[in-house]
Image (spheres, rainbow, N blue to C red):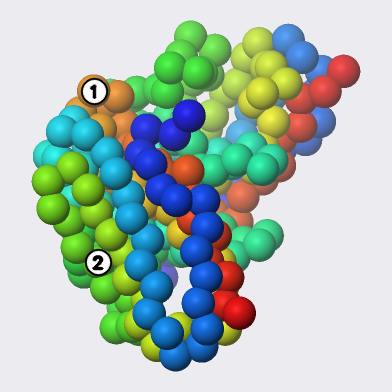
C-alpha cells in the first residue's frame, strides 16, 4: 500500500518563498519518478515538475522554470518542491504523485491529498 | 491554454453512454500512451485508465478508452450518478519533457 502526504502549504505574499513536502510510505520509493501537479481555482490540472527515480534528472513546466526546484531523498522517502518568487498565478492545490511506469506510461496511480497554496498581497 | 483539448462539459441520463474526446499532437498523444483521471470535488485525481485503454484494479469496466493518431477518447457506459465528476486526459509530451494535461470535461448525470 502506497500513501503520499503533502505538507507545507499556506498563504504567502507575492515574491516570497514556500517549500512543499511530500512523504511517501510503502516500498520501492527509490524505483519511481515523482511529480508535482497543481490545480488553480477554476482551472484544470497542470504539471509543475518531475524528478527521476534517482534524482539525477528534473524537468519543469515553463511557467515555473527558474523559480521552482524539485528534489528528493530516497533514504527519507521524501520529495520537496521549493517555490521561490511566488506569483499570484501560482495559487492552487498542489499534489504530489508517483510515476508508475516512467514518462507517464502507466499513469499516476498514487496521489497525495493535496495541499493549498495561496499567493496574495 | 491546456496542451490537450477536451470539451468543457457533457451530460447524460443514468444508464446512458457518454464519450469524452481528447485532442493533442504528435509530441504527446501521437507518440505516448494516454491516461485518464476522474476528479470529484475536493478530492485528489483518481486514475481510471492508463496505457490508453487499460483499467487499474477497482475501476469498473463501464469505463473504456481508445486512442487513434493524435486523439483519444473515454467512454462511460451505463452511466451512474457517482460518475458525475470532472475527467482529465494526460499524456507524456516529448517537447515539454513532462506530462500534458487536458483542460478537463465536466460530466453531469441528469
Q: Residue at x 67, y 17 (%)?
A: A86
Tell me the quadrant of the picture where the C terminus of chain A can be found: top right
Tell me the quadrant of the picture where the N terminus of chain A can be found: bottom left
The percent coordinates of residue B50 (x first, y second) are 26, 61
Q: In the figure, A64 relative to B54: above or below?
A: above
Does residue A98 appear left or right of residue B73 in this picture? right
Which class describes the residues within 10 Å of circle 2: few (<14), some (14-19), or many (20+)?
A: many
The answer for which chain carries disc 1 is B
The answer for which chain carries disc 2 is B
Query: Can you identify the residue that label 1 sits on?
Result: B95
Question: How many numbered discs, if any?
Answer: 2
Cβ atoms under marks 2 and 1 closer than 8 Å: no
Does residue A108 appear left or right of residue B106 in this picture? left
Q: Residue at x 18, y 42 (%)?
A: B70
In what element is the residue under mark 2?
strand
Does residue B17 appear left or right of residue A70 in this picture? left
Which class describes the residues within 10 Å of circle 1: few (<14), some (14-19), or many (20+)?
A: few
Give the camera-side residue of B24 and A57.
B24
Q: Residue at x 69, y 31 (%)?
A: A91
The percent coordinates of residue B14 (x first, y second) are 51, 88
Q: Residue at x 69, y 40 (%)?
A: A41
Residue A119 appearing in the image: yes
Residue B56 appearing in the image: no
Query: Can you identify the residue that label 2 sits on?
Result: B65
Q: In the figure, A99 relative to B96: above or below?
A: below
The percent coordinates of residue A85 (x first, y second) are 66, 11
Amino acid at each position: 500500500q502506497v500513501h503520499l502526504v503533502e505538507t507545507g502549504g499556506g498563504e504567502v505574499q507575492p515574491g516570497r518563498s514556500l517549500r512543499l513536502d511530500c512523504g511517501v510510505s510503502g516500498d520501492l520509493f527509490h524505483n519511481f519518478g515523482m511529480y508535482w501537479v497543481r490545480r488553480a481555482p477554476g482551472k484544470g490540472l497542470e504539471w509543475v515538475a518531475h524528478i527521476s527515480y534517482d534524482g539525477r534528472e528534473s524537468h519543469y513546466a515553463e511557467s515555473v522554470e527558474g523559480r521552482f526546484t524539485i528534489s528528493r531523498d530516497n533514504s527519507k522517502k521524501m520529495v520537496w518542491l521549493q517555490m521561490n518568487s511566488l506569483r499570484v498565478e501560482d495559487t492552487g492545490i498542489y499534489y504530489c504523485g508517483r510515476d508508475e511506469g516512467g514518462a507517464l506510461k502507466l499513469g499516476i496511480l498514487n496521489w497525495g491529498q493535496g495541499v493549498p497554496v495561496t499567493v496574495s498581497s | 491554454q491546456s496542451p490537450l483539448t477536451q470539451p468543457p462539459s457533457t451530460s447524460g441520463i443514468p444508464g446512458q453512454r457518454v464519450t469524452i474526446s481528447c485532442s493533442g499532437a504528435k509530441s504527446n498523444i501521437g507518440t505516448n500512451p494516454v491516461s485518464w483521471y476522474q476528479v470529484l470535488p475536493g478530492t485528489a485525481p483518481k486514475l481510471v485508465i492508463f496505457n490508453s485503454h487499460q483499467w487499474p484494479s477497482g475501476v469498473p469496466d463501464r469505463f473504456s478508452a481508445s486512442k487513434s493518431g493524435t486523439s483519444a477518447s473515454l467512454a462511460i457506459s451505463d452511466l451512474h450518478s457517482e460518475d458525475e465528476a470532472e475527467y482529465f486526459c494526460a499524456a507524456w509530451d516529448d517537447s515539454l519533457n513532462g506530462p500534458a494535461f487536458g483542460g478537463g470535461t465536466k460530466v453531469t448525470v441528469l
